[in-house]
Image (cartoon, helix red, strand yellow):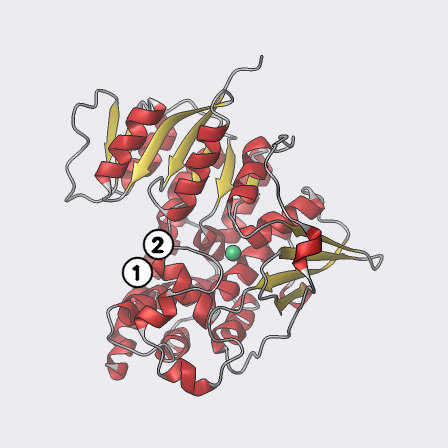
């Protein structure tokens, strides 16, 4: 029997991290978790350490004390993530932390030629050229865990030569077929009740404004080496078709599975093989009609802004992501309305220069600058 694949998971206590852990637990003869990270949920991290005999842990929240009675390696703070990736022996890095904190550890893993299973779309949004360029030169494989990109990857299997267009499907969130009034008066509680997917708070808000799909457009451009004009978005409320590829010869391929991240996680963990499971999956006779609708780019201006940003320079993409994060946090704290989110993104973008960057330090500095500009601009909506 082959030796177990050694895995580091960044963001084990979040919703995607939990799904990956469940899959690993299910197939535990084939995987070994050598390192995990958590932000502040130390109780859950301690349980994972015990259940999976983990040897190393990174705790990113500096206010949190490290796990009790743990005699493995301990890493602290955001820098601890890349230090852990640097020092452990492993085969696969799973990046399931939100935001751009995953960027440095992803670059460290790629530099070591390791496989990266990437759920953090922000990493490719802010530094797509750098990440994909390094992966190519080091021969490292990047497997997308975001369900749409995972679907596309399952259709192309890494061969992007014959792609005509990529069709990203979107649940449409809560408001896609409602009038503007519903959006205007949307409360935090309403927005957090997503009709289909159960996810973290930030991504659930992003799903309502469709900023999530905006980030995914940019993510897809970098992952699959396509132009912005080769991306289409289709609202598919059933969320059964996770995305489609239209090839140059007129054929389409699509990936279907039930609404759960576990199928994407499973595909990534076993790639390039597929594992046989006994559980039932989709019942085609129960599916009924598969419907697709054209999104309204005027109503969902986060989508329109993302398309514009995708055609511009890197500073714009960094600012789009940073301003959205700031605005979502303000919305969750009930300081602004849902509709103010695209306004804050637009205002921040107008204050940024149009520029590409060579180094990680520059990217992180521009990200910080965009955040402070977004905070400043947002004050007019309080
Ligand atoms: Mg997605």
Ligand 1 closer than 8 Å to label 1 CB = no
Find residue 200 and report its image quarter: bottom left
Q: Which residue is under mark 2?
A: 364
Above or below: residue 267 compared with residue 374: above
Q: Residue at x 45, y 38 (%)?
A: 20
Above or below: residue 128 compared with residue 305: above
- Point out the image quarter for the C terminus: bottom left
- Point out the image quarter for the N terminus: top right
Q: Position of residue 189 (x, y in %)?
A: 31, 69
Q: Position of residue 179 (x, y in %)?
A: 48, 85
Q: Residue at x 19, y 31 (%)?
A: 67
Left or right: 304 as drawn, with respect to 353 = right
Identify the residue at the far right of this view. Answer: 249
Q: Is residue 319 visible?
A: no
Marks 1 and 2, how far apart at CA: 6 Å
Number of residue marks: 2
Q: Which residue is under mark 1?
A: 368
Q: Nearer the viewer, residue 133 or 212?
A: 212
Find residue 318 and report its image quarter: bottom left
Q: Is residue 163 visible?
A: yes
Identify the residue at the far front of this view. Answer: 286
Q: Residue at x 57, y 68 (%)?
A: 311
Left or right: 78 as drawn, with respect to 296 = left
Circle 1: element type = helix
Ligand 1 closer than 8 Å to label 2 CB = no
Above or below: residue 34 compared with residue 139: above
Q: Position of residue 53 (x, y in %)?
A: 33, 22
């Amino acid at each position: 029997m082959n030796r177990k694949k050694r895995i580091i998971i960044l963001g084990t206590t979040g919703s995607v991290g939990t799904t990956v852990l469940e899959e690993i637990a299910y197939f535990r003869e084939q995987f070994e978790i050598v390192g995990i990270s958590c932000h502040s949920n130390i109780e859950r991290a301690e349980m994972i350490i015990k259940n999976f005999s983990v040897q190393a842990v990174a705790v990113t929240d500096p206010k949190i004390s490290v796990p009790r009675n743990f005699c493995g390696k301990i890493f602290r703070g955001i820098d601890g993530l890349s230090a852990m990736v640097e020092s452990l022996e492993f085969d696969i890095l799973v990046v399931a932390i939100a935001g751009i904190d995953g960027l440095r550890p992803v670059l460290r893993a790629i530099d070591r030629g390791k496989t990266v299973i990437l759920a953090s779309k922000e990493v490719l949004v802010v530094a797509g050229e750098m990440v994909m360029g390094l992966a190519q030169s080091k021969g490292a494989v990047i497997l997308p865990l975001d369900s749409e990109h995972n679907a596309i990857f399952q259709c192309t299997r890494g061969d992007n030569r014959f792609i005509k267009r990529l069709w990203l499907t979107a649940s449409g969130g809560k408001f896609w077929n409602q009038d503007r009034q519903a959006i205007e008066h949307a409360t935090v509680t309403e927005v957090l009740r997503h009709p289909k997917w159960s996810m973290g708070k930030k991504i659930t808000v992003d799903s309502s404004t469709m900023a999530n799909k905006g980030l995914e457009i940019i993510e897809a451009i970098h992952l699959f080496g396509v132009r912005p004009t080769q991306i289409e978005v289709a609202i598919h409320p059933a969320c059964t078709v996770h995305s489609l590829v239209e090839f140059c010869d007129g054929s389409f391929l699509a990936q279907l599975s039930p609404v759960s991240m576990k199928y994407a996680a499973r595909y990534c963990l076993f790639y390039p093989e597929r594992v046989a499971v006994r559980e039932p999956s989709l019942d085609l006779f129960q599916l009924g009609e598969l419907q697709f609708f054209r999104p309204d780019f005027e109503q969902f201006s986060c989508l329109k802004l993302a398309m514009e940003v995708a055609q511009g320079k890197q500073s714009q993409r960094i600012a789009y992501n940073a301003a959205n994060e700031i605005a979502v946090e303000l919305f969750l704290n009930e300081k602004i309305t849902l509709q103010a989110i695209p306004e804050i993104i637009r205002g921040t973008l107008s204050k940024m220069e149009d520029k590409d960057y060579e180094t990680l330090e520059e990217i992180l500095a521009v990200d910080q600058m965009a955040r402070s500009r977004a905070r400043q601009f947002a004050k007019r909506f309080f």
